[in-house]
Image (spheres, rainbow, N blue to C red):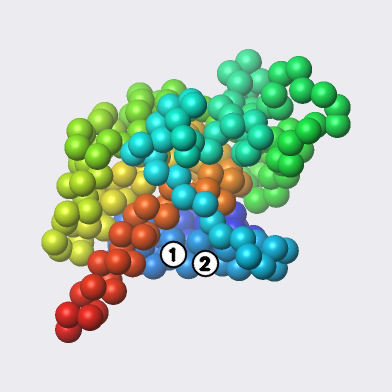
Amino acid sequence: MDEAQFSSTGTVLNPGWGHFDSAFFPWHRELLYRFEQDLRSVRPNVTIPYWDWSRARSAGSAGRPFTHDFIGEDGTDTAGDRVLRQSGAPTPYPYPFDPETWSIVVTDTPAEPRTFRRAFAERGDAPALPLNDTVVPGTGTTVRRAFASSAFTTLRARSEDLHNLVHRWAGGNMITASSPNDPVSGCITHKSIACGRFGRTFTRRCRST
């Protein structure tokens, strides 16, 4: 199953396994696993890169994935938030990833544009990415507070709060149920932060029982 379809199925259908319940962590880990296995069917030694959005927050930051030579930059307002090629780039396009030919196959509705779109920090409920120690608008927690949660239900709720904020911050395709249409959801995946924390917590607690 295509990762965008997998995401849409687990988010929209009833029950929506991917969010707002105890399956939030394992469902997203399964999404990442399936995507990585698909990548390895093409290149066996590939692994999913890691974007720490609590640190690589602005253009030019080391580890920030939004560059023309990687997965493209922000969308262009005058083009309906479509992610465009680097201005003035030669033809043929010199980078492996071409945002203007990126295929959008799965959409939430038939009327949704089949273009690759982003709209960084344009929503009033997501003007900034989460921070380690400061609560930003659009969320009720911080990264450290979420990961310090002793109860699983609190860890899940706080982590999902941060996760949802990143989706809204990115905008465009990332605010749809078929968000893996944006490579930052499936390939670079901010989900790896929360899911990695869940994996470590789960392993530690299993060893202690």
Look at the picture and state if 201 lies above or below 146: below
Seen at 31% across and 59% down, the residue is 197
Q: Which dot marks residue 33?
A: 2
Q: How many marks?
A: 2
Residue at the left extreme, as displayed = 150
Residue at horizontal 25 percent and vertical 44 percent from the top: 143
Label 2: element kind: helix
Cα separation between marks 2 and 1? 6 Å
> Is 132 in front, or is 176?
132
Residue 137 percent location from the top left of the image = 26, 29
What's the residue at 13%, 61% (across, down)? Answer: 150
Tell me if 165 is positioned left or right of 106 in this view: left
- Position of 78 relative to 176 (above/below): above
Question: Can you tell which quarter of the image residue 111 is in?
Answer: top right
Q: Residues within 10 Å of mark 1 (few under 14, many from 20)?
A: some
> Looking at numbered disc 2 in the image, what kind of residue is underneath it?
Tyr
Residue ID for mark 1: 29
Left of 63 or right of it: where is 6? right
**Res. 16 in view:** no
**Residue visible at 20% across and 61% down?**
153
- The amino acid on which the numbered mark 1 sits, given as a three-letter code, is Arg
Quadrant of the image occupied by residue 22: bottom left
Q: Is residue 144 left or right of residue 54?
A: left
Does residue 102 appear left or right of residue 22 in this picture? right
Q: Is residue 180 above or below residue 79?
A: below
Secondary structure type for disc 1 = helix
- Screen quadrant of the N terminus: bottom right
Q: Between residues 94 and 141, which one lies in front from this camera angle? A: 94
Above or below — where is 49 with respect to 40? above
Q: Give the image quarter of residue 78.
A: top right
Q: Are marks 2 and 1 in contact (CB under 8 Å)?
A: yes
The percent coordinates of residue 94 (x first, y second) are: 78, 33
